[in-house]
Image: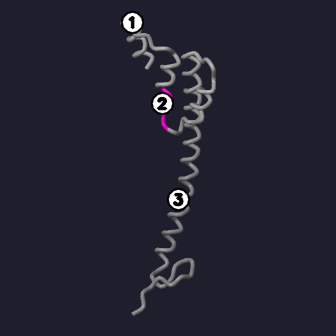
Amino acid sequence: MKGISDSLAIVGALVSTDDLISSVLIGLDRNYLAIASVIQGKNEIEWEKFQALLLRFETTLEQYNIALGINSLVVYDSHSVNAAEVKSSGSKSSTSGTNTSQQS
């Protein structure tokens, strides 16, 4: 975005920092809503500081997603094991004691 802004400035079409930041914020997905709200609440912010805040938030978000991914994988694996136990226990009953066989 900054490159486009600089190119426009060369031909005489200036884009303000506020407009540039607004354009970037509009393009972010909902995962960035928290940082977008913080940035929009500031009166004045320089482009470099905006980039630093956004990059710091993105790093934090990635770390959170990695941690969440590990936790959800553990939960998924434990459910898979339970499902395998139920299936391998035979058609007469499951591990919960419910009769799964069909009677004619």
Residue 57 lies left or right of residue 92; in this view the side is right
Instruction: Give the amino acid at mark 3.
Output: Asp
In the picture, residue 54 is in which quadrant?
Answer: top right
Q: Which residue is mark 3?
A: 77
Query: Is residue 28 rendered magenta in the image?
Result: yes
User: Residue 64's quadrant in the figure?
Assistant: top right
For the residue carrying disc 1, how many other residues have a C-alpha within 10 Å: few (<14), some (14-19), or many (20+)? few
Rounded to the nearest angstrom, the CA distance separating label 1 from label 2 is 24 Å
Residue to which mark 2 is pinned: 26
Mostly what secondary structure, the magenta segment? helix
Judging by the rendered image, the residue that carries numbered circle 1 is 12
Circle 3: element type: helix
Q: Decide: few, some or many residues near mark 3? Use Cα within 10 Å; few <14, some 14-19, many ≥20.
A: few
Residue drawn 36% across and 6% down? Answer: 11
State the residue at coordinates (53%, 68%).
Answer: 82
Color scheme of the displayed model:
one colour
The secondary element bearing badge 1 is classed as: loop
Mark nearest the camera among 3 and 2 is 2
Magenta extent: 24-29
Nearer to us of marks 1 and 3 is: 1
Decide if residue 27 is on the left or right side of residue 74.
left
Q: Amino acid at mark 1?
A: Gly
Nearer-N-terminus badge (1/2): 1
Q: Are marks 1 and 3 in contact (CB under 8 Å)?
A: no
Q: Does 58 sit above or below residue 90?
A: above
